[in-house]
Image (cartoon, rainbow, N blue to C red):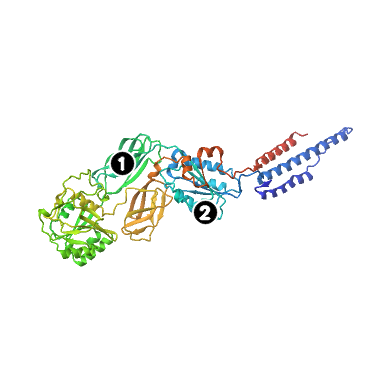
């Protein structure tokens, strides 16, 4: 027999108290006067004998009550057999990603871990890990401490790969220099996440048990993506929001609610077939020029953890276009003046303002061969810093100026075409390659038989890879070159009516708009995923060393920003509470709303079965697979089960029993 709290055994000295009371009975004898003393001797003998028996029984009851009370406090155990080494440790990983809310899987995992660990030996130790990888979880806990830690577990937005968790376990093993460890994984094992067996990590020796908490596919409708019909989102202008709804399993009909700044804007009903996508739309209009916090809510769906999708509509900022030309009425000026999204700034060749270059988003050079060397040098410097430039030659460009100007930007292979404009030398522009991301959302329909503009290039570029537009004979018409952090686009045909009719063709306006819009960096993405490691927004910090705040409700995180050219980036805090609209406080006067959503993979509720997991890990002898039903039935996950007989409860009951005996003796024993 052993005692858990041996220090309480010193309390056995307390049995001296009733003994002292017994030996020094301070009761004074009462004087009783009898008128007949004939029978006094026999009565005295009977009373004295009975009293001695009673007092000894009371003394014994008190001593035994104290002894068993002390034993109860010391918690005696009779050693039984154990099923494993009592020095064994367990590393427990609990998947607390959003999908574990389905069928209450997270709570079921925590409840059963608590039940199993309470049956473990007193010497058994645990290390707990969840998706957060918190520093405080690097410690070893006993069963009681583990119970407290389990109560703190909450859903987080990320889901780590199996190999990453396994490597974390192995790193902890090395830190403790102890290989007598069993690893336990509690997860739903979604098929939307690869198990990356080839990167399983170094811990291939310690026993590992995977507990599959779910094995039946659950039908779910979730929001895949959102976008606006008009890329220009402006105050008091009608626009349309498109929403792609995906269904993972059986056909479903759901309602979708759209809110802007907590005000309902629309409600639609949609039926989505099995494993398909349905497109719905909402008309909307922004009432002011501030970013609008938006929310899409799915109703009538059994799965609720991903029914809300957050995003922010940022009004399109003015795009500042610097037009460098000597023409009084250039075509580029006309195309950007007609759309109020653009702000046109004009400079003449030879009189270029560096201030205008710096504040512009996009630069158009009509006649790059007319620029002076210092202007070419300044232009190249701004491109390297991240600017986007589109350059056209002048109508009367010479061979020397073209070749020297092109070579300055790294085009050494320019070939001058010595010809006069004539109908015989006409070429036609080929239909754009719609697979190029640049042309995304430009064409509603693809008609390769459409009439395309004619072109009469004045020089040839031997470029085969970085081509944006080309002629029907497969020669480059508009090509591009990355210089530093910026892009330089070069066209080999002047914007002159004898050289091309591109300016009057339907493709010209959307092409020039897209060229300018791709240069702006003033709006963050509509939303970001919680599992993103870095958040990047177009903003230039004035003080890179000053931390900024990332806030939601009453929770604030301090993040350290870094500047990457014209983009500010910061690492997303690992324990953000979940999806929603957050505020990035850059200064006392500037706050940018950012939307975070759970990863799309979380919404695909298709799971690996026990048999599939066994097939995946068949080459790893140390890995065992069990599903939740098996574990719940036999509790076999706790190898180090406690078989000691704990008798402190019985000791307490016996102590109370002797107290009752003492009371009965005093009251009823005559």
User: Is there any visible trace of residue 447 in the rendered image?
Assistant: yes
Where does label 2 land, which residue? 172
User: Which secondary structure, mark 1?
Assistant: strand
Q: CA distance from mark 2 to mark 1?
A: 45 Å
Residue 141 is labelled as none
- Placement of 382 over or under 190, stated as above or below: below
Left/right placement of residue 228 relative to residue 102 reads left
Counting other residues with Cα less than 10 Å from the Cα at mark 1, is it few (<14), some (14-19), or many (20 or more)? many
- Residue in front for this viewpoint, 460 or 395: 460
Where does label 1 land, which residue? 243
- Placement of 271 over or under 69, stated as above or below: above
Q: Residue 85 at what x, y percent from top left? A: 61, 48
Left/right placement of residue 338 relative to residue 57 reads left
User: Which secondary structure, mark 2?
Assistant: helix
Quarter placement of the N terminus:
top right
Q: Residue 502 at what x, y percent from top left? A: 16, 51
**Sequence-earlier tag: 2 or 1:** 2
Of the two numbered discs 2 and 1 in the rendering, the one whose residue sits closer to the viewer: 2
Report the residue that reaches farthest toward the bottom: 374
- Placement of 430 over or under 659, stated as above or below: below
- Residue in front for this viewpoint, 417 or 58: 417
**Quarter of the image where one finds residue 298:** top left
- Residue in front for this viewpoint, 245 or 197: 197
**Quarter of the image where one finds residue 23:** top right
Disc 2 vs disc 1: Cβ atoms closer than 8 Å? no
Left/right placement of residue 544 relative to residue 352 reads right
Q: Residue 383 at what x, y percent from top left? A: 26, 61
Q: Residue 420 at what x, y percent from top left? A: 10, 58
Left/right placement of residue 316 relative to residue 95 reads left
């Amino acid at each position: 027999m052993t005692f858990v709290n041996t220090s309480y055994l010193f309390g056995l000295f307390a049995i001296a108290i009733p003994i002292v009371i017994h030996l020094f009975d301070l009761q004074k004898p009462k004087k009783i006067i009898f008128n007949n003393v004939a029978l006094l001797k026999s009565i005295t003998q009977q009373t004295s004998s009975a009293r001695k028996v009673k007092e000894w029984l009371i003394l014994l009851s008190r001593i035994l009550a104290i002894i068993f009370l002390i034993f109860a406090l010391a918690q005696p155990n009779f050693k039984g057999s154990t099923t494993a080494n009592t020095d064994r440790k367990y590393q427990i990983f609990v998947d607390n990603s959003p999908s574990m809310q389905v069928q209450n899987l997270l709570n079921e995992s925590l409840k059963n871990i608590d039940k199993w660990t309470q049956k473990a030996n007193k010497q058994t130790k645990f290390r707990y890990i969840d998706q957060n990888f918190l520093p405080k979880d690097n410690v070893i806990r006993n069963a009681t401490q583990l119970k407290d830690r389990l109560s703190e577990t909450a859903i987080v937005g990320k889901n780590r790969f199996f190999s990453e968790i396994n490597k974390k376990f192995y790193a902890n093993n090395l830190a403790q220099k102890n290989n007598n460890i069993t690893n336990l994984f509690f997860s739903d094992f979604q098929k939307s996440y690869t198990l990356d067996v080839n990167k399983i990590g170094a811990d291939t020796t310690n026993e590992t048990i995977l507990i599959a908490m779910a094995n039946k596919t659950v039908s779910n409708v979730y929001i895949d993506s959102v976008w606006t019909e008009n890329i220009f989102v402006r105050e008091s202008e009608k626009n349309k929001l498109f929403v792609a709804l995906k269904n993972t399993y059986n056909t479903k009909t759901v309602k979708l609610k759209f809110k802007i700044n907590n005000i309902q804007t629309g409600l639609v009903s949609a039926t989505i077939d099995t494993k398909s996508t349905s497109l719905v739309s909402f008309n909307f209009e922004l009432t002011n020029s501030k970013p609008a916090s938006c929310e899409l809510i799915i109703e009538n769906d059994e799965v609720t953890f991903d029914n809300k999708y957050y995003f922010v509509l940022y009004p399109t900022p003015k795009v500042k276009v610097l037009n460098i030309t000597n023409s009084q009425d250039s075509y580029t000026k006309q195309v950007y003046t007609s759309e109020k999204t653009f702000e046109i700034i004009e400079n003449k060749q030879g009189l270029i303002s560096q201030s205008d270059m710096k504040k512009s988003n996009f630069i158009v050079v009509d006649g790059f061969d007319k620029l002076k060397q210092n202007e070419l040098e300044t232009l190249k410097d701004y491109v390297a810093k991240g600017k986007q430039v589109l350059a056209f030659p002048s109508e009367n460009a010479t061979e020397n100026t073209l070749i020297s100007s092109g070579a300055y930007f790294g085009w050494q292979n320019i070939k001058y075409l010595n010809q006069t404009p004539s109908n015989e030398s006409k070429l036609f522009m080929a239909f754009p390659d719609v697979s190029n991301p640049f042309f995304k959302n430009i064409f509603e329909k693809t008609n390769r038989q459409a009439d395309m503009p004619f072109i009469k290039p004045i020089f040839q570029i031997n470029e085969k890879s970085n081509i944006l537009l080309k002629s029907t004979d497969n020669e480059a018409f508009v090509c591009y070159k990355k210089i530093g952090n910026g892009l330089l686009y070069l066209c080999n045909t002047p914007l002159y009516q004898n050289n091309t009719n591109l300016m009057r063709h339907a493709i010209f306006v959307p092409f020039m708009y897209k060229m300018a819009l791709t240069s702006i960096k003033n709006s963050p993405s509509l939303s970001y995923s919680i599992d993103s490691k870095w958040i990047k927004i177009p903003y230039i910090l004035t003080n890179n060393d000053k931390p900024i705040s990332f806030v939601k409700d009453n929770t604030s995180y301090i993040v350290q920003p870094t500047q990457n050219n014209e983009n500010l980036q910061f690492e997303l805090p690992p324990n953000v509470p979940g999806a929603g609209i957050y505020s990035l406080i850059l200064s006392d006067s500037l706050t940018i709303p950012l939307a975070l959503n759970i990863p799309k993979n979380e919404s695909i509720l298709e799971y690996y079965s026990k048999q599939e997991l066994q097939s995946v890990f068949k080459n790893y002898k140390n890995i065992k697979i069990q599903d939740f039903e098996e574990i719940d039935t036999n509790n076999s996950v706790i190898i180090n089960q406690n078989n000691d007989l704990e008798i402190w409860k019985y000791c307490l009951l016996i102590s109370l029993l002797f107290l009752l005996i003492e009371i009965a003796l005093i009251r009823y024993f005559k």
